[in-house]
Image: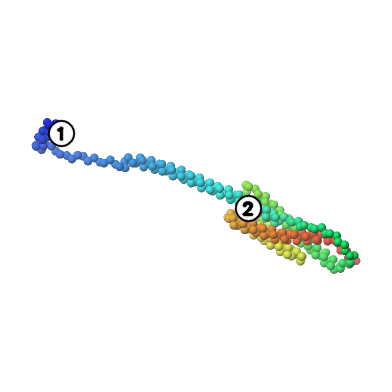
Protein backbone atom coordinates (compact mmCIF):
# COMPACT_ATOMS: atom_id res chain seq x y z
CA UNK A 1 0.00 0.00 0.00
CA UNK A 2 1.24 3.42 -0.91
CA UNK A 3 1.73 5.37 2.38
CA UNK A 4 0.98 8.67 0.59
CA UNK A 5 -2.49 7.46 -0.50
CA UNK A 6 -4.93 8.88 2.04
CA UNK A 7 -7.91 6.85 0.85
CA UNK A 8 -5.94 3.66 1.25
CA UNK A 9 -4.86 4.67 4.71
CA UNK A 10 -8.46 5.49 5.70
CA UNK A 11 -9.69 2.17 4.40
CA UNK A 12 -6.97 0.35 6.23
CA UNK A 13 -7.92 2.17 9.47
CA UNK A 14 -11.60 1.27 8.97
CA UNK A 15 -10.77 -2.41 8.48
CA UNK A 16 -8.55 -2.52 11.55
CA UNK A 17 -11.28 -0.94 13.66
CA UNK A 18 -13.60 -3.76 12.74
CA UNK A 19 -10.93 -6.46 13.19
CA UNK A 20 -11.23 -7.50 9.60
CA UNK A 21 -7.42 -7.65 9.01
CA UNK A 22 -5.62 -10.81 10.09
CA UNK A 23 -1.92 -10.32 10.60
CA UNK A 24 -0.06 -13.36 9.19
CA UNK A 25 3.69 -13.71 9.63
CA UNK A 26 5.76 -13.44 6.57
CA UNK A 27 6.94 -16.81 5.31
CA UNK A 28 10.41 -17.71 6.36
CA UNK A 29 12.65 -17.98 3.39
CA UNK A 30 15.28 -20.66 3.73
CA UNK A 31 18.75 -19.23 3.46
CA UNK A 32 20.61 -20.05 0.38
CA UNK A 33 22.86 -23.04 0.83
CA UNK A 34 26.44 -22.03 1.22
CA UNK A 35 27.70 -25.37 -0.02
CA UNK A 36 25.49 -25.41 -3.07
CA UNK A 37 27.56 -23.20 -5.35
CA UNK A 38 30.78 -24.69 -3.98
CA UNK A 39 30.10 -28.30 -5.02
CA UNK A 40 31.05 -27.89 -8.65
CA UNK A 41 34.22 -26.07 -7.63
CA UNK A 42 35.19 -28.85 -5.17
CA UNK A 43 34.58 -31.44 -7.83
CA UNK A 44 36.72 -29.44 -10.19
CA UNK A 45 39.47 -29.32 -7.56
CA UNK A 46 39.18 -33.06 -7.09
CA UNK A 47 39.53 -33.66 -10.83
CA UNK A 48 42.49 -31.30 -11.03
CA UNK A 49 44.11 -32.91 -7.96
CA UNK A 50 43.76 -36.40 -9.48
CA UNK A 51 45.39 -35.23 -12.71
CA UNK A 52 48.24 -33.53 -10.84
CA UNK A 53 48.83 -36.62 -8.71
CA UNK A 54 48.85 -38.86 -11.75
CA UNK A 55 51.42 -36.65 -13.51
CA UNK A 56 53.52 -36.49 -10.35
CA UNK A 57 53.41 -40.29 -10.02
CA UNK A 58 54.39 -40.72 -13.64
CA UNK A 59 57.34 -38.37 -13.15
CA UNK A 60 58.46 -40.26 -10.06
CA UNK A 61 58.12 -43.61 -11.82
CA UNK A 62 60.11 -42.27 -14.77
CA UNK A 63 62.90 -41.14 -12.46
CA UNK A 64 62.86 -44.48 -10.66
CA UNK A 65 63.18 -46.38 -13.95
CA UNK A 66 66.04 -44.11 -14.99
CA UNK A 67 67.86 -44.90 -11.75
CA UNK A 68 67.22 -48.63 -12.21
CA UNK A 69 68.45 -48.60 -15.81
CA UNK A 70 71.55 -46.61 -14.85
CA UNK A 71 72.27 -49.10 -12.08
CA UNK A 72 71.85 -52.05 -14.46
CA UNK A 73 74.19 -50.43 -16.99
CA UNK A 74 76.82 -49.77 -14.31
CA UNK A 75 76.46 -53.33 -13.02
CA UNK A 76 76.87 -54.74 -16.54
CA UNK A 77 79.94 -52.59 -17.17
CA UNK A 78 81.44 -53.62 -13.85
CA UNK A 79 80.74 -57.30 -14.56
CA UNK A 80 82.36 -57.13 -17.99
CA UNK A 81 85.38 -55.32 -16.60
CA UNK A 82 85.71 -57.82 -13.78
CA UNK A 83 85.43 -60.76 -16.18
CA UNK A 84 88.16 -59.23 -18.33
CA UNK A 85 90.41 -58.74 -15.31
CA UNK A 86 89.77 -62.27 -14.07
CA UNK A 87 90.42 -63.79 -17.48
CA UNK A 88 93.72 -61.95 -17.76
CA UNK A 89 94.71 -63.05 -14.26
CA UNK A 90 93.78 -66.69 -14.94
CA UNK A 91 95.62 -66.64 -18.25
CA UNK A 92 98.74 -65.27 -16.54
CA UNK A 93 98.44 -67.99 -13.94
CA UNK A 94 98.22 -70.80 -16.51
CA UNK A 95 100.46 -69.56 -19.35
CA UNK A 96 103.88 -71.16 -19.23
CA UNK A 97 106.72 -68.76 -18.54
CA UNK A 98 109.94 -69.01 -20.51
CA UNK A 99 112.91 -68.34 -18.25
CA UNK A 100 115.88 -66.41 -19.49
CA UNK A 101 118.66 -68.76 -20.36
CA UNK A 102 122.14 -67.26 -20.25
CA UNK A 103 124.51 -68.72 -22.77
CA UNK A 104 127.42 -70.40 -21.11
CA UNK A 105 130.77 -68.72 -21.73
CA UNK A 106 133.46 -71.25 -22.61
CA UNK A 107 136.15 -71.33 -19.96
CA UNK A 108 139.48 -73.02 -20.33
CA UNK A 109 139.56 -76.05 -18.08
CA UNK A 110 142.07 -78.63 -17.23
CA UNK A 111 142.15 -82.03 -18.84
CA UNK A 112 139.04 -84.03 -17.91
CA UNK A 113 139.43 -86.57 -15.23
CA UNK A 114 137.49 -89.72 -14.76
CA UNK A 115 133.95 -89.08 -13.47
CA UNK A 116 132.82 -91.55 -10.86
CA UNK A 117 130.41 -94.04 -12.34
CA UNK A 118 128.20 -93.91 -9.24
CA UNK A 119 127.70 -90.15 -9.58
CA UNK A 120 126.81 -90.50 -13.28
CA UNK A 121 124.18 -93.12 -12.54
CA UNK A 122 122.76 -91.01 -9.73
CA UNK A 123 122.58 -87.94 -11.97
CA UNK A 124 120.96 -89.91 -14.79
CA UNK A 125 118.37 -91.31 -12.39
CA UNK A 126 117.66 -87.82 -11.04
CA UNK A 127 117.19 -86.44 -14.57
CA UNK A 128 114.85 -89.30 -15.44
CA UNK A 129 112.76 -88.65 -12.33
CA UNK A 130 112.66 -84.95 -13.13
CA UNK A 131 111.47 -85.52 -16.68
CA UNK A 132 108.86 -88.06 -15.57
CA UNK A 133 107.49 -85.70 -12.96
CA UNK A 134 107.43 -82.71 -15.32
CA UNK A 135 105.70 -84.81 -17.97
CA UNK A 136 102.83 -85.48 -15.56
CA UNK A 137 102.63 -81.81 -14.56
CA UNK A 138 102.72 -80.59 -18.17
CA UNK A 139 99.77 -82.81 -19.06
CA UNK A 140 97.63 -81.17 -16.39
CA UNK A 141 98.85 -77.69 -17.32
CA UNK A 142 97.81 -78.30 -20.93
CA UNK A 143 94.38 -79.45 -19.81
CA UNK A 144 94.03 -76.36 -17.60
CA UNK A 145 94.93 -74.04 -20.49
CA UNK A 146 92.19 -75.65 -22.58
CA UNK A 147 89.69 -75.15 -19.74
CA UNK A 148 90.74 -71.52 -19.33
CA UNK A 149 90.27 -70.90 -23.06
CA UNK A 150 86.74 -72.33 -22.82
CA UNK A 151 86.02 -70.10 -19.82
CA UNK A 152 87.29 -67.03 -21.69
CA UNK A 153 85.17 -67.83 -24.74
CA UNK A 154 82.01 -68.16 -22.64
CA UNK A 155 82.50 -65.06 -20.50
CA UNK A 156 83.66 -62.83 -23.38
CA UNK A 157 80.30 -62.99 -25.20
CA UNK A 158 78.10 -60.02 -24.32
CA UNK A 159 74.86 -61.93 -24.84
CA UNK A 160 75.60 -64.57 -22.24
CA UNK A 161 73.88 -64.21 -18.90
CA UNK A 162 75.26 -64.52 -15.40
CA UNK A 163 73.89 -68.08 -15.31
CA UNK A 164 76.15 -69.11 -18.19
CA UNK A 165 79.10 -67.29 -16.62
CA UNK A 166 78.48 -69.14 -13.36
CA UNK A 167 78.30 -72.46 -15.21
CA UNK A 168 81.62 -71.71 -16.93
CA UNK A 169 83.21 -70.81 -13.58
CA UNK A 170 81.86 -74.04 -12.09
CA UNK A 171 83.38 -76.09 -14.93
CA UNK A 172 86.72 -74.35 -14.51
CA UNK A 173 86.57 -74.98 -10.76
CA UNK A 174 86.11 -78.69 -11.48
CA UNK A 175 89.14 -78.66 -13.79
CA UNK A 176 91.23 -77.09 -11.03
CA UNK A 177 90.04 -79.81 -8.63
CA UNK A 178 91.02 -82.56 -11.04
CA UNK A 179 94.44 -81.06 -11.76
CA UNK A 180 95.14 -80.56 -8.06
CA UNK A 181 94.24 -84.18 -7.25
CA UNK A 182 96.43 -85.61 -10.02
CA UNK A 183 99.48 -83.40 -9.34
CA UNK A 184 99.22 -84.06 -5.60
CA UNK A 185 99.64 -87.79 -6.32
CA UNK A 186 102.91 -87.25 -8.22
CA UNK A 187 106.19 -87.96 -6.47
CA UNK A 188 108.54 -85.05 -7.17
CA UNK A 189 112.30 -85.48 -6.98
CA UNK A 190 113.99 -83.74 -4.03
CA UNK A 191 115.06 -80.68 -6.06
CA UNK A 192 111.46 -80.05 -7.17
CA UNK A 193 109.62 -80.53 -3.88
CA UNK A 194 109.47 -76.81 -3.11
CA UNK A 195 108.21 -76.06 -6.61
CA UNK A 196 105.67 -78.87 -6.21
CA UNK A 197 104.36 -77.25 -3.00
CA UNK A 198 104.20 -73.79 -4.62
CA UNK A 199 102.23 -75.12 -7.58
CA UNK A 200 99.69 -76.92 -5.38
CA UNK A 201 99.28 -73.78 -3.25
CA UNK A 202 98.62 -71.78 -6.42
CA UNK A 203 95.97 -74.27 -7.51
CA UNK A 204 94.35 -74.01 -4.06
CA UNK A 205 94.17 -70.24 -4.45
CA UNK A 206 92.63 -70.59 -7.90
CA UNK A 207 90.00 -72.99 -6.59
CA UNK A 208 89.11 -70.54 -3.83
CA UNK A 209 88.95 -67.73 -6.40
CA UNK A 210 86.48 -69.75 -8.48
CA UNK A 211 84.36 -70.25 -5.36
CA UNK A 212 84.35 -66.48 -4.91
CA UNK A 213 83.32 -66.02 -8.53
CA UNK A 214 80.41 -68.40 -8.09
CA UNK A 215 79.34 -66.41 -5.03
CA UNK A 216 79.72 -63.16 -7.00
CA UNK A 217 77.49 -64.36 -9.85
CA UNK A 218 74.82 -65.14 -7.26
CA UNK A 219 75.04 -61.91 -5.25
CA UNK A 220 77.01 -59.38 -7.39
CA UNK A 221 78.78 -58.11 -4.27
CA UNK A 222 81.88 -56.10 -5.10
CA UNK A 223 83.85 -57.24 -2.06
CA UNK A 224 83.52 -60.87 -3.19
CA UNK A 225 84.88 -60.00 -6.64
CA UNK A 226 87.79 -58.10 -5.11
CA UNK A 227 88.60 -61.11 -2.96
CA UNK A 228 88.64 -63.34 -6.06
CA UNK A 229 91.05 -60.98 -7.82
CA UNK A 230 93.42 -60.95 -4.83
CA UNK A 231 93.39 -64.73 -4.63
CA UNK A 232 94.10 -65.08 -8.33
CA UNK A 233 97.02 -62.68 -7.99
CA UNK A 234 98.40 -64.76 -5.10
CA UNK A 235 97.91 -67.91 -7.19
CA UNK A 236 99.82 -66.34 -10.08
CA UNK A 237 102.79 -65.56 -7.84
CA UNK A 238 102.88 -69.09 -6.42
CA UNK A 239 102.59 -70.75 -9.83
CA UNK A 240 105.17 -68.43 -11.39
CA UNK A 241 107.72 -69.47 -8.76
CA UNK A 242 107.07 -73.14 -9.44
CA UNK A 243 106.99 -72.69 -13.22
CA UNK A 244 110.41 -71.09 -13.42
CA UNK A 245 111.92 -73.98 -11.44
CA UNK A 246 110.10 -76.50 -13.65
CA UNK A 247 111.43 -74.95 -16.84
CA UNK A 248 115.01 -74.65 -15.63
CA UNK A 249 114.97 -78.24 -14.37
CA UNK A 250 113.59 -79.45 -17.69
CA UNK A 251 116.30 -77.64 -19.64
CA UNK A 252 118.99 -79.01 -17.36
CA UNK A 253 117.69 -82.58 -17.60
CA UNK A 254 117.25 -82.44 -21.38
CA UNK A 255 120.70 -80.97 -21.96
CA UNK A 256 122.47 -83.57 -19.81
CA UNK A 257 124.86 -85.47 -22.00
CA UNK A 258 125.46 -89.23 -22.01
CA UNK A 259 127.88 -90.60 -19.43
CA UNK A 260 131.49 -90.21 -20.43
CA UNK A 261 132.50 -93.51 -18.83
CA UNK A 262 130.53 -96.71 -18.55
CA UNK A 263 131.23 -100.15 -17.26
CA UNK A 264 131.56 -102.92 -19.75
Q: Is residue 181 visible?
A: no
Depth check, front residue: 257 or 230: 230
| Disc 2 packing (10 Å; few <14; some 14–19; many ≥20) | some
Across and down, in percent, residue 130 comes to: 78, 62
Quarter placement of the N terminus: top left
Depth check, front residue: 5 or 13: 5
Depth check, front residue: 261 or 164: 261
Across and down, in percent, residue 50 comes to: 42, 43
76 horizontally vs 20: left or right: right
Cα separation between marks 2 and 1: 106 Å
* Residue at which label 2 appears: 82
What kind of element bears circle 2? helix
* Residue at which label 1 appears: 3
Q: Is residue 244 visible?
A: yes
Across and down, in percent, residue 5 comes to: 14, 31
Q: Residue at x 31, y 42 (%)?
A: 35
- How is colour applied across the structure in the image? rainbow
Q: Residue at x 62, y 57 (%)?
A: 226
The answer to which quarter of the image holds residue 189 is: bottom right
Vertical side of 40 occupied by 152: above or below: below
Amino acid sequence: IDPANQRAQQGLTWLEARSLIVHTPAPVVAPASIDGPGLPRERQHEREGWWVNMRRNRREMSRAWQVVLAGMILLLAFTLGLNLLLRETIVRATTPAVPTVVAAVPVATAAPTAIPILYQRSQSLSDAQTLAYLSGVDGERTRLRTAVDAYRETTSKLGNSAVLHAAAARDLRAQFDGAHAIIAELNPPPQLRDAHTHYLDGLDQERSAMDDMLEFYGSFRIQVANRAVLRLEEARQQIDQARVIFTVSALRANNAGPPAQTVR
